[in-house]
Image: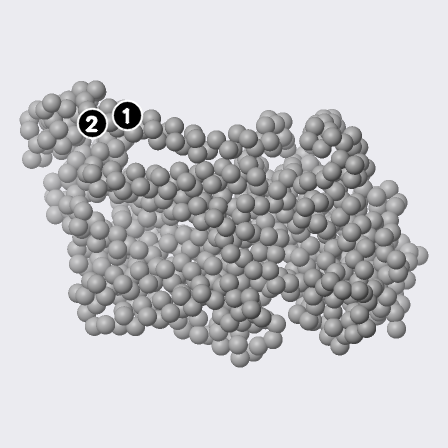
């Protein structure tokens, strides 16, 4: 798609009046692109809408009857929602693994596809915010968290830091993607002044979102399972596995379904990143498990329960072993020489990584933090039907957002549509 | 793209439709647009239907509640209005005439609590008294006190059980009731994103039930399992409701917010003793003003072998445990 860069207008100068006229045109075109497509597109969107509606209904019931509709208790007070939230922060941060090669190492193939990662960040953060709202006992009081209007316990509460970094990351990516798309729509070369600084801020910012999210948990002295300095580094490493894994799958779908040119270089670079991050993750996992189990004692109680159960209580065992085995198998598969030429192996590895990390950063991390409780009571947690429905609904809503963002971005970047369309040909 | 499209671009944007649709599908009311319109209408209707249960949510009906500001920012008049509203709501929802007061901390008072592990028999009467005094949800049998049955020879909570169900005291056991430690350095207060929980001048950590957003971060942060969440609207039969209620303590809590032990501030700030202490048949509990050198609690702290729970976490509890001999 960058092959037509030469046809773009450079150093275009416009008055404000020009944008008043052309920006609504850009938005109108976006709406048009979002609402028309192939039958596959319609079927996909209708399917996602149905799942999202089921989720919306489940959430409405939960708000009406209270969180009693979930399986959470005073002992396990966070569950599937916060588990998904944690994973999705990582997915959002994972997109940066495209941004760094594209902008710092000037990887050309990656530069052409980097928008896929940036749009993924937008959709992931949107899902994160939905999961947080789903987890609130009083979503009607959401405004209490808004700085100036409500009471914002900053800088003491790590949750306020999380609100800042997540929304900041959302705004950064909205600006970068919005600007690039609008400029492409106008058929002009984007002015680096208006986006490159933001891209570099967003790289640092991506690291911050997952670090701050880890600090939410590892800052709690009363929860030994989370209270480890390795938590934030592991969060980042797993994000840089799961993000590329998801994007590799998306890139292949895009290559098959659209006219966008996806250079082999993008997938190769992402695969190389995954090959390393997954091994670093395994090293850190081994380091953690060694510390827990060799030392033993009550500090290791949660880990023992997670992996081996406790006197017949073993709700988390299937989860964590699925995760551990998936990640180990994926790590082995990724060692296959020239794996980027063996797409089937790569796809299997990507799916295993995605599932494995989703569990590891979710059910395998959030729940054992609560079991046993701080007074060593043993209460297990198995998500309720309502929780599964709400979670599926939020994932569907997120995929709707991501699909629509791609639906607008791809034709514009492929030069198939825009204000200049026709004039150049 | 044809010249036709080039010309029309900028006015109606019809140019962006793929050329194959260009001919007979032009105009607003073509088959495709009608289908899309029908689909969108159906979608909106389905969404409205899916979200309908939310309109049956009682708590959401009050605009005043929605707009109510933080406890510490309410003027005297505003607070009086809020209290009147809450009393009316309790009358409507529970049928009870209650009296909600806003008792402020006294100057020169800092509350401390001590518990004698040598004589506690684990009868759980304190937990029951807490349940009744604080208008806890009857269905869940909630209480701010968890009594642990511990094995003699170990102070490790890992050896304790809260779910024992046999005559007490057992000869090889000792009993350790745990409730809010009213920490000097409370992790629950630090983590709250909206300052809905704070430490009062007399040392009591309170929650503004009308400001809490229900994120439960404080519940994750507390090392003593002292906090509780209202998973649903509390159910208390009219005749069992304790009508003497404190705004920051035992008034019936709304659905979806946090709550916790307040050392019965609606009683203790008026010079009475906490309900759990009054219910204790063995006299294991000692409550008083830490700033008064002549108080019983100061005598205990000065003369007994005293310890606090999880001292290594640096929370500095104002709840102490001691042994007689």
Residue B203 horizontal side relative to residue B324, left or right = left
**Residue B37 tag number:** 1
Q: Can the viewer see residue A21 in this picture?
A: yes
Residue B235: image quadrant is top right
Name the chain letter of the residue that bears numbered label 2. B
Badges 2 and 1, same chain: yes
> Callout 1: few (<14), some (14-19), or many (20+) C-alpha neighbours within 10 Å?
few
In depth, the one of A300 and A210 nearer the eye is A300
The quarter in which the C terminus of chain B is drawn is bottom right
**Residue A83 tag number:** none
Residue B165: image quadrant is bottom right
Residue A250, above or below A375:
above
The CA span between labels 2 and 1 is: 9 Å
Which residue is at 9% across, 35% downward?
A424
Residue B141 horizontal side relative to residue A316, left or right = right
Among all residues in the image, which is located at the extreme bottom? A294
Which residue is at 46% across, 58% downward?
A362
Which residue is labeled 2 in the image? B32
Question: Where in the figure is residue A185, as x and y percent of width and height?
Answer: 21, 35
Dot 1: what SS?
A: helix
- Sequence-wise, the earlier of marks 2 and 1 is 2
Residue B130, above or below A235:
above
């Amino acid at each position: 798609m960058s092959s037509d860069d030469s046809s773009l207008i450079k150093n275009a100068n416009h008055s404000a009046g020009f944008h008043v006229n052309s920006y609504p045109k850009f938005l109108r075109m976006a709406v048009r692109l979002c609402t028309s497509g192939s039958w596959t597109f319609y079927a996909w969107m209708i399917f996602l809408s149905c799942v999202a509606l089921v989720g919306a209904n489940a959430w409405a019931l939960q708000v009406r009857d209270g969180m009693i509709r979930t399986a959470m208790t005073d002992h396990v007070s966070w569950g599937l929602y916060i588990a998904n939230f944690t994973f999705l922060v990582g997915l959002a941060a994972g997109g940066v693994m495209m941004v760094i090669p594209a902008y710092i190492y000037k990887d050309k193939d990656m530069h052409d596809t980097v928008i896929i990662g940036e749009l993924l960040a937008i959709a992931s953060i949107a899902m994160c915010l939905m999961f947080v709202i789903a987890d609130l006992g009083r979503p009607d009081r959401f405004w209490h968290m808004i700085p100036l209007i409500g009471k914002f316990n900053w800088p003491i509460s790590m949750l306020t830091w999380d609100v800042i970094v997540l929304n900041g990351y959302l705004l950064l990516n909205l600006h970068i993607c919005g600007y690039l798309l609008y400029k492409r729509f106008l058929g002009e070369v984007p002015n680096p002044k208006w986006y490159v600084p933001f891209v570099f801020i967003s790289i640092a910012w991506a690291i911050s979102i997952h670090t701050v999210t880890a600090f939410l948990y590892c800052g709690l002295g009363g929860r030994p399972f989370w209270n480890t300095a390795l938590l934030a580094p592991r969060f980042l490493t797993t994000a840089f596995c799961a993000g590329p894994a998801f994007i590799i799958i998306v890139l292949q779908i895009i290559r098959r379904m659209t006219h966008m040119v996806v250079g082999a270089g993008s997938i190769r670079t992402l695969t190389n990143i995954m090959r390393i991050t997954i091994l670093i993750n395994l090293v850190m996992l081994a380091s953690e498990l060694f510390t827990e189990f060799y030392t033993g004692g009550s500090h290791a109680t949660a880990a023992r329960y997670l992996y081996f159960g406790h006197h017949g209580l073993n709700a988390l065992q299937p989860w964590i072993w699925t995760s551990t085995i998936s990640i180990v198998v994926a790590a082995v598969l990724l060692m296959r020489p020239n794996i980027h030429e063996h797409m089937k192996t790569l796809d299997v590895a990507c799916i295993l990584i995605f599932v494995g990390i989703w569990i590891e950063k979710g059910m395998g991390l959030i729940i054992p933090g609560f079991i046993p409780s701080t007074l060593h009571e043993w209460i297990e947690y198995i998500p309720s039907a309502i929780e599964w429905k709400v979670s599926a609904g939020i994932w569907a809503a997120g995929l709707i957002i991501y699909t629509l963002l791609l639906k607008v971005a791809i034709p514009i970047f492929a030069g198939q549509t825009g204000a200049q369309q026709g004039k150049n040909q | 793209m044809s010249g036709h499209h080039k010309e029309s671009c900028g006015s109606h944007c019809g140019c962006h439709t793929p050329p194959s649709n260009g001919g007979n599908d032009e105009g607003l009311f073509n088959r495709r647009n009608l289908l899309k319109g029908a689909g969108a209408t159906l979608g909106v209707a389905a969404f409205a239907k899916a979200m309908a249960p939310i309109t049956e949510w009682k708590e959401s009906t009050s605009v005043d509640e929605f707009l109510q500001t933080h406890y510490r920012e309410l003027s005297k008049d505003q607070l009086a209005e809020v209290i009147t509203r809450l009393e009316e709501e309790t009358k409507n929802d529970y049928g009870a005439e209650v009296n909600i007061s806003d008792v402020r901390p006294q100057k020169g008072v800092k509350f401390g609590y001590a518990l004698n592990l040598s004589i506690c028999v684990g009868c759980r009467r304190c937990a029951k008294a807490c349940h009744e005094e604080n208008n806890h949800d009857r269905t869940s049998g909630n209480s701010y006190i968890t009594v642990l049955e511990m094995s003699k020879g170990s102070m490790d909570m890992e050896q304790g059980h809260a779910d024992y169900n046999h005559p007490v005291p057992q000869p090889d056991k000792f009993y350790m009731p745990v409730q809010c430690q009213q920490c000097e350095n409370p992790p629950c207060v630090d983590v709250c994103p909206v300052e809905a929980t704070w430490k009062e001048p007399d040392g009591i950590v309170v929650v503004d039930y009308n400001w809490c957003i229900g994120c439960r971060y404080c519940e994750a942060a507390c090392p003593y399992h002292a906090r509780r969440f209202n998973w649903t609207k509390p159910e208390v039969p009219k005749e069992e409701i304790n009508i003497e209620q404190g705004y920051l303590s035992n008034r019936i809590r709304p659905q979806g917010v946090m709550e916790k032990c307040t050392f019965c501030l609606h009683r203790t700030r008026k010079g009475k003793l906490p309900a759990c202490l009054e219910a204790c048949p063995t006299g294991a509990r000692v409550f008083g003003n830490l700033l008064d050198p002549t108080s019983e609690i100061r005598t205990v702290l000065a003369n007994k072998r005293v310890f606090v729970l999880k001292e290594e976490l640096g929370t500095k509890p104002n709840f102490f445990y001691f042994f007689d001999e």
